[in-house]
Image (cartoon, helix red, strand yellow):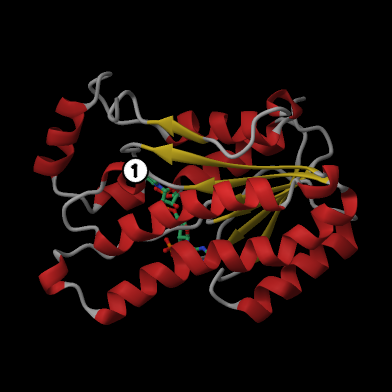
C-alpha cells in the first residue's frame, strides 16, 4: 500500500486521467477526495465524490474545509482538472480564452491557495500539477491551453521554492503528459492524432493509467527528494 491512509484530493477526477488516478490511489490505501464539475460514481468506498468547480472560489474553500473537518488533514493535492477550447488565434474568442485560463490556471491557483495553509501547518505534503507537452513546446490552435500549461510549470517551480521555506517538506511537481486516450483527445481530428503518433518514439498514444502511475509515485513517499520538477509522460514525443 503505497498511499496508506493518505488524504488525497484529486480535481477533474470524474473522467480520463483523474478517474484512473482516483481508482489507483484508493487501491493503494488512500482516502480519495474525488472532485469534479460533473457527476461521477466509483465502486471503491474509499473514494469520496465532491461536486466541485475549481473556478468557484467559495465552493473550493468550503470543500477543503469540509475535508479537513472530516478526515483531519490533506496530504496530497492533484490539480488535474483541465479543459480545451481550441482555435487558431485569429479565430479564438475572448470567451474561450477566459474559460481555459479560468479552469486550467486560476483553478490550480484556487485549489492550491485553499489547501496549502493546512500543509504548511502540518509541515508536509505533495502537490501535483498537470501540465502538458503543449506547455513545453506549444501547439497549433492551442494559444489559451499552451499559456495555461506553461503557466502551471511556472507556478510549480515557484511553489516548490515558496512552500519549502522554514524546512517544510512540501513538494510541488508537474506532470506533462503527451497524447493520452481520454474524452479530451476524442475531440482531436484523427489526422492530427496520427501525426502525433508518428512523432512519438513509442508510436502510440498513452493510457490514462500510465499517467496515474506517475501521479502515484509523486504522491507517495518514494519521491520524497523530488520537487520543482516537470516529469514528461509522453512516450518520447518531446526529446
Ligand atoms: P477529461 O477526460 O476531459 O477529464 C477532465 C475532467 O475535469 C472532466 O471530468 C471534466 O468535466 C473535469 N472538469 C472540467 N472543468 C472542471 C472544473 N472547472 N472543475 C472541476 N472539474 C472540471 O481530460 P483528461 O484528458 O483526463 O485530462 C486531465 C488533465 O490532463 C487535464 O489537465 C489535461 O489538460 C491534462 N492533459 C491531458 C492530455 C491528454 O492527452 N488527454 C495531455 C496532456 C495533458 P467535464 O467532462 O464535464 O468537462
Give whichever of 174, 167 is nearer the camera: 167
Q: Residues within 10 Å of mark 1 (few under 14, many from 20)?
A: some
Q: Residue at x 44, y 36 (%)?
A: 208
Q: Position of residue 132 (x, y in %)?
A: 38, 44
Q: Is residue 190 left or right of residue 146?
A: left
Q: Residue at x 31, y 46 (%)?
A: 134
Q: Position of residue 171 (x, y in %)?
A: 69, 41
Image quadrant containing the C terminus: top left
Q: Residue at x 70, y 38 (%)?
A: 26
Give whichever of 143, 201 is nearer the camera: 143
Give whichever of 48, 64 is nearer the camera: 64
Residue beneath disc 1: 136
Residue 19 in view here? yes
For residue 62, above or below residue 26: below
SS for dot 1? helix
Residue, far top? 202
Image quadrant containing the N terminus: top right
Q: Position of residue 72 (x, y in %)?
A: 90, 55
Q: Where, by quadrant of the figure, is residue 120 drawn?
A: bottom right
Q: Where, by quadrant of the figure, is residue 49 drawn?
A: bottom right
Q: Position of residue 229 (x, y in %)?
A: 54, 36
Give whichever of 111, 10 is nearer the camera: 111
Q: Is residue 180 left or right of residue 109?
A: left
Q: Is residue 173 left or right of residue 119?
A: left
For residue 55, above or below residue 80: below
Dividing the image into four quarters, tell me where ligand 1 lies: bottom left
Q: Is residue 79 left or right of residue 102?
A: right
Q: Residue at x 45, y 62 (%)?
A: 104
Amino acid at each position: 500500500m503505497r498511499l496508506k491512509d493518505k488524504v488525497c484530493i484529486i480535481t477533474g477526477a470524474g473522467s480520463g486521467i483523474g478517474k484512473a488516478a482516483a481508482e489507483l490511489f484508493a487501491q493503494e490505501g488512500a482516502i480519495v477526495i474525488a472532485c469534479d464539475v460533473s457527476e461521477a460514481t466509483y465502486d471503491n468506498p474509499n473514494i469520496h465524490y465532491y461536486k466541485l468547480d475549481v473556478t468557484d472560489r467559495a465552493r473550493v474553500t468550503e470543500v477543503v474545509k469540509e475535508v479537513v473537518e472530516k478526515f483531519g488533514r490533506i496530504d496530497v493535492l492533484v490539480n488535474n482538472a483541465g479543459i480545451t477550447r481550441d482555435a487558431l488565434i485569429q479565430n479564438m474568442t475572448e470567451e474561450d480564452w477566459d474559460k481555459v485560463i479560468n479552469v486550467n490556471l486560476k483553478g490550480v491557483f484556487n485549489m492550491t491557495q485553499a489547501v496549502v495553509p493546512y500543509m504548511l501547518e502540518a509541515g508536509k505534503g505533495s502537490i501535483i500539477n498537470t501540465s502538458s507537452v503543449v506547455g513545453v513546446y506549444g501547439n497549433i490552435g492551442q494559444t489559451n491551453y499552451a499559456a495555461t500549461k506553461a503557466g502551471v510549470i511556472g507556478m510549480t517551480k515557484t511553489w516548490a521554492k515558496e512552500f519549502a521555506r522554514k524546512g517544510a517538506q512540501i513538494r510541488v511537481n508537474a506532470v506533462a503528459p503527451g497524447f493520452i486516450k481520454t474524452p479530451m483527445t476524442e475531440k482531436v481530428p484523427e489526422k492530427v492524432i496520427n501525426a502525433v503518433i508518428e512523432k512519438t518514439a513509442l508510436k502510440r498514444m498513452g493510457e490514462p493509467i500510465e499517467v496515474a502511475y506517475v501521479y502515484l509515485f509523486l504522491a507517495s513517499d518514494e519521491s520524497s527528494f523530488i520537487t520543482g520538477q516537470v516529469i514528461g509522460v509522453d512516450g518520447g514525443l518531446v526529446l
